[in-house]
Amino acid sequence: MNESAKPVSASQTTITELMIPSYANFGGKIHGGILLSLMDKVAYACASKHSGAYCVTVSVDKVEFLQPVEVGELVSMHASVNYVGNSSMVIGIRVESQNVKKGTSKHTNSCYFTMVAKGDDEKPTTVPKLILENKEQVKRFIEMITMREIKTKMKEEMDDARSHIHLETAAEFLKNERCILKV
Ligand SMILES: CC(C)(COP(=O)(O)OP(=O)(O)OC[C@H]1O[C@@H](n2cnc3c(N)ncnc32)[C@H](O)[C@@H]1OP(=O)(O)O)[C@@H](O)C(=O)NCCC(=O)NCCS
């Protein structure tokens, strides 16, 4: 069992990549999947630095593509460990896209990857505690605890809602929705 502790700064990681034409979709903007792949890489790098172990991605929260990223822009993904549990770590990723020619930069989104450290036996393994050195880091750690609680509650509510769907009343329930029932 690893009882050590590490500061947030020890594993902070940034990946910067040039958005080349082959990353673009038919509309000429960068594919969401390219950005997701980069997020996963930086989350892995950050989580494995903190844990000193092989890590797997367990869940991804709050990924939104609110502003398009253009070909030729430099995308930077800044990753920090925001929270640690026993074997899990929540990695916060801030995505920024820079237009070098115009000298402009936009914050395209912030999202959270939950990663779990695994031992040589493939089982979840304990990660070092997180040393919080400023108020922002304390705030983020607490935010992640709240996010976990909200997710658990939402899952319970969703399971409950799913068990209360009655197909006999579907036609009435869906009458103002943009769908056509053919069953
Ligand atoms: C995630 C995984 C390691 C959980 O294994 P498990 O044997 O069920 O282990 P546990 O129940 O002890 O959970 C381990 C940790 O994962 C966390 N976890 C499990 N499911 C989770 C979920 N849906 N969301 C967030 N965290 C989750 C648990 O809270 C626990 O955290 P903690 O140790 O900090 O308390 C296992 O399901 C796995 O390997 N999944 C595949 C991951 C993968 O291959 N990812 C690549 C994506 S293609």
Image (tube, rainbow, N blue to C red):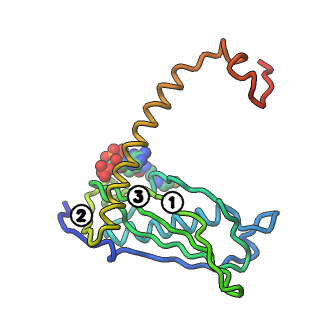
The residue at the point 81 percent across, 64 percent down is 27
How far from the left and from the top, in percent, is residue 154? Answer: 46, 37
Upstream in sequence: badge 3 or badge 2: 3
Q: Going by the picture, which residue comes out furthest to the front? A: 135
Residue 116, above or below 78? above
Q: Which residue is mark 2?
A: 129
Q: Quadrant of residue 91?
A: bottom left
Question: Residue 82's mark?
Answer: none
Q: Amino acid at mark 2?
A: Lys
User: Element at badge 2?
Assistant: strand
Instruction: Give the Cα separation between the discs numbered 1 and 2.
Output: 22 Å
**Kind of residue at badge 1:** Cys
Q: Is residue 162 left or right of residue 54?
A: right
Of badges 3 and 2, nearer the viewer stands: 2
Residue sitting at x 75%, y 68% = 24
**What separation in Å lies between label 1 and label 3 (alpha carbons)?**
13 Å
Eye-nearest disc, 1 or 3: 1
Please report the residue visible at 64 percent of the width from the left and 59 percent of the height from the top.
65
Image coords of residue 76 (percent x, y): 56, 76
Q: CA distance from mark 3 to mark 2?
A: 15 Å
Instruction: Give the residue number, with chain letter if any, for mark 1.
Output: 111
As drawn, 144 above or below 7: above
Above or below, 19 relative to 30: below
Amino acid on which the number 3 mark rests in the picture? Met
Indicate left or right for 183 with 139 as reference.
right
Q: Residues within 10 Å of mark 2 (few under 14, many from 20)?
A: some
Disc 3: which residue: 115
